[in-house]
Structure formats: C-alpha cells, structure tokens
Amino acid sequence: MTLPAFPTAATTAELERGAVLAPRFDANGLIAAVTAHAETGEILMLAWMNAQALSLTLTTGEAHYYSRSRQGLWKKGETSGQVQKIVEVRVDCDQDAVLLKVLPQGDGGACHVGFRSCFYRVVEDGRLVERP
C-alpha cells in the first residue's frame, strides 16, 4: 500500500488556520499523539506517530503508532485485542501534535500493564500511588 506524503504549509497562516493537513514532525520524524476515549473524554495514552503511522490511522480508521523503543510501526491491539477505532482526529494549532478520539475494543483497555488508561498513577508526596 502506497501512502500519500503530507504537504508542508507555506505560511504560518496556512499552518494555523488553513484547511490542509500539514503535520510538523520533529527532527526524528515523529509527532505526539494523545489518545482519548471518544465517549468519556478520558485520556488513555500518549504515543508517537511517524508519517506512516498517521497515514495508516487516517486510511484504516484504526490507531497505528511508532514505537521509539522498538524503532518500528505498530497497530494498537494487534496482539492484545485492544484495537482503537477512530472516531475523530484533531490536530493542534501548529500541527505538531494530534488528538485521537477512539472507541477501544477488546477489554476496553489501553495500557500494556493492564489498566484502562496508561495514566493510572498519581503523584502524592513525591511518590507514585496507583489510582485506576
């Protein structure tokens, strides 16, 4: 499957107010992706996407990410069953981060440790306390 390349915005106005999706990937070719539950708004995870992951997400309607530790593309839920069905994709004002609103499949979780959200710990008095 050949995926389209993303254009570059010619001006700040085009980047910030234009209708063209022109994501600004960092020096490593990545963009931050915040994933939230489409129905509850709960933040499920933060991950990274390269151009291929973003293209596949937009094309397939299922979340794909780039693993910095494994240096490779991964489809969320491919092994866990926690596929994330895309409801909406938003981009921030300067197009260097995306927000995915998803409906989690499988057991409804997003965290590889077994929690619904990757943000299952709270900082209390300088210590981490689990609070699902």
Image (cartoon, helix red, strand yellow):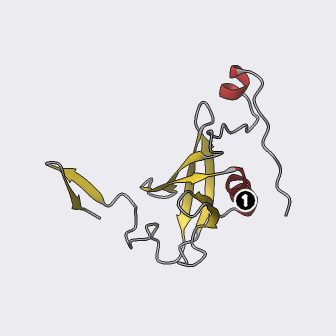
Toward the viewer: 4 or 68?
A: 68
Percent from the top left, x then y, of residue 84?
58, 66
Q: Residue at x 62, y 52 (%)?
A: 49
Q: Quick one: which residue is furthest to the right in this view?
A: 2
Name the residue carrying label 1. 56
Percent from the top left, x then y, of residue 34?
51, 50
Vertical side of 76 occupied by 47: above or below: above
Residue 9 seen in this snapshot: yes
41 on left or right of 92 = left
Residue 63 seen in this snapshot: no
Q: Residue at x 69, y 28 (%)?
A: 15
Q: Residues within 10 Å of mark 1 (few under 14, many from 20)?
A: some
Percent from the top left, x then y, of residue 2?
86, 59
Could you tell me which secondary element the residue under label 1 belongs to? helix
Q: Quick one: which residue is furthest to the left in this view?
A: 125
Instruction: Count every numbered label the image shows and give the total.
Output: 1
116 on left or right of 72 = left
**Quadrant hosting residue 129:** bottom left
Q: Residue at x 39, y 73 (%)?
A: 114
Percent from the top left, x then y, of residue 110?
46, 66
From the image, which quarter does the C terminus lie in?
Answer: bottom left
3 on left or right of 17 = right
From the image, which quarter does the N terminus lie in?
Answer: bottom right
Vertical side of 126 occupied by 103: above or below: below
Q: Residue at x 39, y 71 (%)?
A: 113
- What type is the residue that disc 1 sits on? Leu
Vertical side of 131 occupied by 23: above or below: above
Toward the viewer: 87 or 16?
A: 16
